[in-house]
Image (spheres, coloured by chain):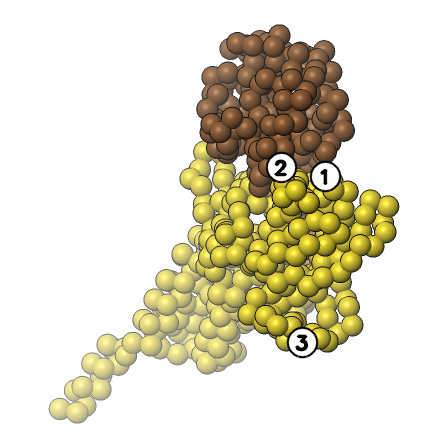
Amino acid sequence: MISRATALWAAGGGVALVLAQDVVPGAALYHTWQYALAVAVVLTIAALAIVPAWRGRIGARGRWLAVALAAAAALDVAGLASGLLGPDTARIIGDPGTVTPIPALGAAAFFGAADADTIARGNAGVVLRRRGAAALRIAGAGHRLDGESILGLDARPAAFIDAWGARGEHLTITQPANASFLSPVLLFRQRQRIGEFDVPIDGFATPGRARVFRALYFSVHDLANFHRPVADLSHPALVLSVADDSGRPGGIVLLPSGQTVTIGGVRVRATIGSYPALSIASAPPVWALALGLPLFALGIAAGFMPSRRKAAVVQPAGV
Amino acid sequence: MRTGVVIAVLAALCAGCYNAPDPGAAAPGGPDALAGAPAQSFALPRTDGRIDSIARHRGSVVLVNLWATWCTPCREELPDLERFARAYAGRVVVLGIDQGESASTAAQFARTLGVTYPILVDLDEQYGRAYQGLGLPTTVIIDRKGRVVRGIDGAMTVAQMRAAVAPALAAQ
């Protein structure tokens, strides 16, 4: 026989495990067998205690307790399904001003346009559009529950590059190695290990001057641990190396955010900041939460209220 | 006993973790992937100083040509594009959009080649990103309703331009 305390602990623990998917979304833990097993165990205990509770075998006001246990079990099933059957957390890195279809959500993500100021402020957003539905705007640090997914933004390092030739003419920036060939915004999709640093890396070219650049992103923290003293530790910086079309190296330079350097005959300015990636984590469906949580709370609250019948028996004895 | 069986069944369920489709899986890119989608538009200065955009030409078939002065195939294509623009004047709006270069650079170059259609200066390469240009030149055909009909990667001949705009011109 399952005791009342065990049933309550199992129900409460299960609800907490499932709610964690909404409170701390995107954790890899939810897709592990250990998490699924933990939810399965508390689900089993709660489910097995429903009938005894309904029949009043595990304490007073058992029917209310049974309601709470049933609601917890339903939430556990929803949480188990989203953890087990839901996709792993996906992170979509889209270039500013582009549209990325997301077939699994039946939607398209519109990544906001970004100029140098937007990159510096890091306040670009993403709009999710579906045919026949209102657009869902995601901005800032908050998360949005959308059906069985939790959508949020992860700020990632980004740099807006401006380049000029010897006569001061603005140059086209291309990214031959990236999905967005024509873009002055570096999104640093790769990382590279250099000594004790593991830093984001990206590259671009100025075909008008036949130069190819490689850019390593150093955060303020990285710069503080740089092997040489860095004058400006208030902003992140790029370590920029250049080569010509045939691969012949043309120099290397530290380029702090907002400053301009001349390297390989090209004047380069980098405005360093952030640009969001869209993260999509699976979550228990909204209907399960909307139904299960109030029922669970109601069942627990009513289950712990003093029994009127018991009070009626006690009262005459005291008179 | 019954409890043990239920737990065993649930544990087996847990062990068979299922991999759902990745929501981050993106569709293949390139300018032609946008066919059928609403054409994105950004207001930009032209080399003559006026502000122009794709949206301003709603109701007309628009041929958008993304190019730059350093791009050899673009240089080769521009005279054909000028011939096409003259031949289709009044039926198709041709917009050249220079990617990332100064207005003076683009204007001087266009003048040298005798280009008369409007050249927009896209310093931040917004059109290049929005139309998923895989290289230059990139040509995008937009219908009267403001939807992308086709996106073409690489230089085109006059005959190819005619063929590209024909479905948009034929549509009501």
Given residues A156 and A28, the one toward you in this image is A156
Horizontal side, residue B144 vs residue B78: left or right: left
Q: Which mark is residue A229?
A: 3
**Amino acid at pointer 3:** Pro
| Residue B101, numbered circle | 2
Asked if badges 1 and 2 are on one and the same chain, I answer: no
**In the rendered picture, chain B carries what hue?**
brown
Q: Are marks 1 and 2 in contact (CB under 8 Å)?
A: yes
Which numbered tag is attached to residue A208?
1
Question: Furthest residue to the left?
Answer: A319
Residue B31 shows in this picture = no
Mark 3–mark 1 Cα distance, whole angstroms, equals 34 Å
Task: Find residue B81 and report its horizontal and vertical position in percent.
Answer: 66, 17
- Please give the letter of the chain rendered in yellow: A
Q: Amino acid at mark 1?
A: Gly
Q: Secondary structure at mark 3?
A: loop
Q: For residue B15, which quarter of the picture?
A: bottom right
Three-letter amino acid code at disc 2?
Glu
Q: Identify the image quadrant of residue A197.
A: bottom right
Q: Is residue B138 above or below residue A57?
A: above
Could you tell me which residue is drawn at 73 percent across and 25 percent down? B75
Identify the mark nearer the N-term, 3 or 1: 1
Residue A223: percent from left, percent from top: 65, 72
Task: Say which quarter of the image contains residue A237.
Answer: bottom right
Chain letter of disc 2? B
Image coords of residue A184 (percent x, y): 63, 46
Which residue is nearer to you in this view: B13 or B105?
A: B105
Identity of the residue drawn at 44% across and 41% down: A135
The answer for how far apart the CA atoms under marks 1 and 2 are is 9 Å
Rendered position, A15 above or below A128: below
